[in-house]
Image (spheres, rainbow, N blue to C red):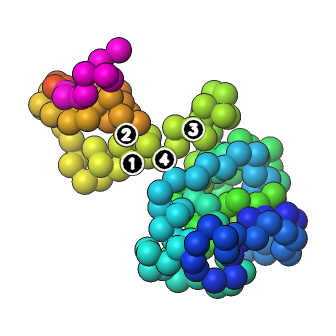
Amino acid sequence: MKAAYINQTGSYNEIKIGELPTPVVGDIDVLVKIDYVSVNHVDTFVRAGGFETSMKFPFVIGRDAVGTVTRIGNSVTRFNVGDHVWTNSMGYDGRNGVASELAAIPESRLFKAPDVDEVQLIASLHSSATAAIVLHDVFGIKRNKNILIEGAGGHVGTKLVQLSKLSGLNVTTTSNARDFE
């Protein structure tokens, strides 16, 4: 299978494009044919070695992907072959990334994709997941509470506003005048 990978951390010049073996599917894994990937700042930190994490080389880069299930492990219960799925938590902590034709993703790190355009989905994955984690896991939000979102015109800020409103929060924002529209 073709993949983008590194054999050591360093500059972007360390990224190789080439053939690697098809990933092994364990009992709790789902083999996904990758349709779209995105690159975010965390990817560059991992590749450069600035974000220390466990890696086995060759190491496939990339965290975020949208794709289609092609095979499931024996213990997988939430997915079926043919399901459209997304992930945003690969490419660190010993898990190979998703900048490849195929990726073996633990069931716990995979989600069913909504019925939306896949290009729009991959473009919003990182910022949407970041906003959801901040609101629900970090802040533990509750309906009818107030929230101030600074920088609401940015990529994550926009998602924070949208998810806050959907979660029943009273939203106040700040943003740069050039982002008002």
The residue lying at 37 percent from left, 39 percent from top is 156
Q: Which residue is mark 2?
A: 156
Q: Position of residue 149 (x, y in %)?
A: 21, 35
Contact check, label 2 and label 1, Cβ < 8 Å? yes
* Badge 4: residue crowd in 10 Å (few <14, some 14–19, many ≥20): many
Give the spatial CA distance, label 2 vs label 1.
Answer: 7 Å
Choose the circle earlier in sequence order: 1 or 3. Answer: 3
Q: Amino acid at mark 3?
A: Ala
Choose the circle earlier in sequence order: 2 or 3. Answer: 3
Give the spatial CA distance, label 4 vs label 3.
Answer: 8 Å
Mark carried by residue 130: 1
Q: Which residue is mark 4?
A: 126
Give the spatial CA distance, label 1 vs label 3.
Answer: 13 Å
Q: Position of residue 106 (x, y in %)?
A: 62, 66
Q: Was residue 22 drawn as part of the magenta stretch in this picture? A: no
Choose the circle earlier in sequence order: 2 or 4. Answer: 4
Q: How many marks?
A: 4
Segment tinted magenta in the rendering = 173-181
Q: Which residue is mark 3?
A: 123
* Badge 2: residue crowd in 10 Å (few <14, some 14–19, many ≥20): some
Q: Dot 4 lies on which element?
A: helix
Q: Quadrant of residue 22?
A: bottom right
The residue lying at 47 percent from left, 61 percent from top is 42
Q: Position of residue 81 (x, y in %)?
A: 80, 49
* Badge 1: residue crowd in 10 Å (few <14, some 14–19, many ≥20): some
Q: Quadrant of residue 179?
A: top left
Horizontal relation, residue 165 to residue 17: left or right: left
Horizontal relation, residue 113 to residue 145: left or right: right
Q: Amino acid at mark 4?
A: His
Q: Was residue 178 drawn as part of the magenta stretch in this picture? A: yes
Q: Dot 3 lies on which element?
A: helix
Query: Which residue appears farthest toward the top when viewing the image?
Result: 181
